[in-house]
Image: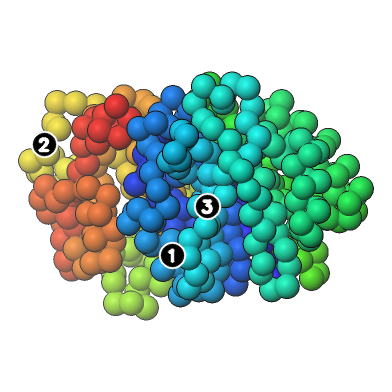
Amino acid sequence: MKICIAQTKSQKGKAKENIQNHLRIIELGVKSNTDLIIFPELSITNYEPNLAKELTTEIENSIFNLFQELSNNNDVTIGIGMPTKANDGIKISMLIFQPNEKRVVYSKQMLHSDELPYFVCGNDQVILNIKEKKIAIGICFETLQSEHFLNANKEGADIYIASVAKPKGGIEKAYKHFPKIAREFSTPILMSNCIGNCHNFISVGQSAVWNKNGKLIEHLDSENQGILIYDTETELVKIDQSKIEKGQLFDLEKIFQIYLNGKIDLENNGIYQWTDNYPSISIIENDLKKDVLYTLKSNEKIIGAINISEEQETEYKLIKWEFNNSKVLVIHRLVIDPKYQKKGYAQKLMDFAENFAKENNYSSIRLDAYSQNLEVIEFYKKRNYFIRGNVNFPEREYPFHCMEKDIITVYNNLYN
């Protein structure tokens, strides 16, 4: 069987946005024919004890229906983190969706002392039976307590999965504890950790897989979302992890080739938004020299790029923008290599650009989209970009829509 361990970055208390992120990651796992996908502790709300009371819900809540549908349609079991209601309080739980079966809740049985003011303990261990393998789940603090593993082992667990939210110190303890236990009991141990701000600490990822001999087979980094897919038969691990960073001049030819690939793909679909003169290699080189081109890498291979700057086309002066007297960020030349499209990578680049705008106090973002590229226009509209007018560029038969997004209002609604 194949087990997918997800490493995610969740937004504080924003279940709707986090669910969308989960769905994109599940799609990656499904494409690799995984049988089980496990997310970090409290992944739907982020690890936020102070907010648990107002965020808690029940597994039958309709917001989780999509997870059940994905489970049913793809024959995959999915475990997500969520605080749940109980008669005696609130529990730190994993909601488990199995193909065409009743939903199951596993609640953390052993709490850290600083969790006691907010949560109560669960009572029962859950053992998942998938393809003749018994899989035990543990949540964060309890996974470092030998008693929890021993109880799972007594119930016949073949594999142990830790769903956690751990800072640097916690990960250092896990990297010492898990290989020792895996080796002693000849049991593979997998760990799913989150990244980013959590309550009063920063979670540092490094999700990992240890085989039954306690050997660290593979792990993710400490800064980026990604997945590990562990094949229990071959003990091989596949990594899918992406990161965004400033492009480098020594990668100019690789980056330009991606733009050429994108141009050819567009033309094969009857869309002639790029020409032989745009984007040219000199334009991309200039972007790199100005430090305004960012590259998207998946497993260290460049698969996309985006220009983020304050430079506006001369034609933009013809448009009646809504935010004319404010600090404006502009997006140009977004591209994903055709081989990697339809996997959420364009979303990652846009998320990055919009976070960049917020962090650097921009009021809005502007961009232009070819009016014949209906799929791209719909993509931007779904992200709350609005058409403010049209412009024409040389060598194109049809106009471009000039689009704009209000960053201040959107992000104030998200984070306040």
Which residue is identified by label 2? 322
Amino acid on which disc 1 is placed = Gln
Residue extending farthest to the front is: 87
- Could you tell me if residue 168 is visible in this image? yes
Which residue is identified by label 3? 105
Q: Is residue 15 left or right of residue 239?
A: left
Please tell me which residue lies in front, 315 or 120. Answer: 120
The crowding category of the residue bearing disc 2, from other C-alpha atoms within 10 Å (few below 14, some 14 to 19, many at least 20), is few
Q: Residue at x 75, y 36 (%)?
A: 144
Kindly state the secondary structure of the residue where label 1 is placed. Answer: helix
For the residues labelled 1 and 2, the Cα–Cα distance comes to 42 Å
Q: Earlier in the sequence, mark 1 or mark 2?
A: 1
Amino acid on which disc 3 is placed = Val
Question: Which percent across, then down, holds residue 2?
Answer: 68, 67
Q: Is residue 143 left or right of residue 255?
A: right
Amino acid on which disc 2 is placed = Glu
Number of the front mark, 3 or 2: 3
Question: Which percent across, then down, holds residue 180?
Answer: 88, 42
Image quadrant assignment for residue 157 = bottom right
- Could you tell me if residue 245 is visible in this image? no
The crowding category of the residue bearing disc 3, from other C-alpha atoms within 10 Å (few below 14, some 14 to 19, many at least 20), is many
Question: Which percent across, then down, holds residue 350?
Answer: 37, 47
Which residue is identified by label 1? 68
Q: Residue at x 12, y 54 (%)?
A: 390
Q: Are marks 3 and 1 in contact (CB under 8 Å)?
A: no
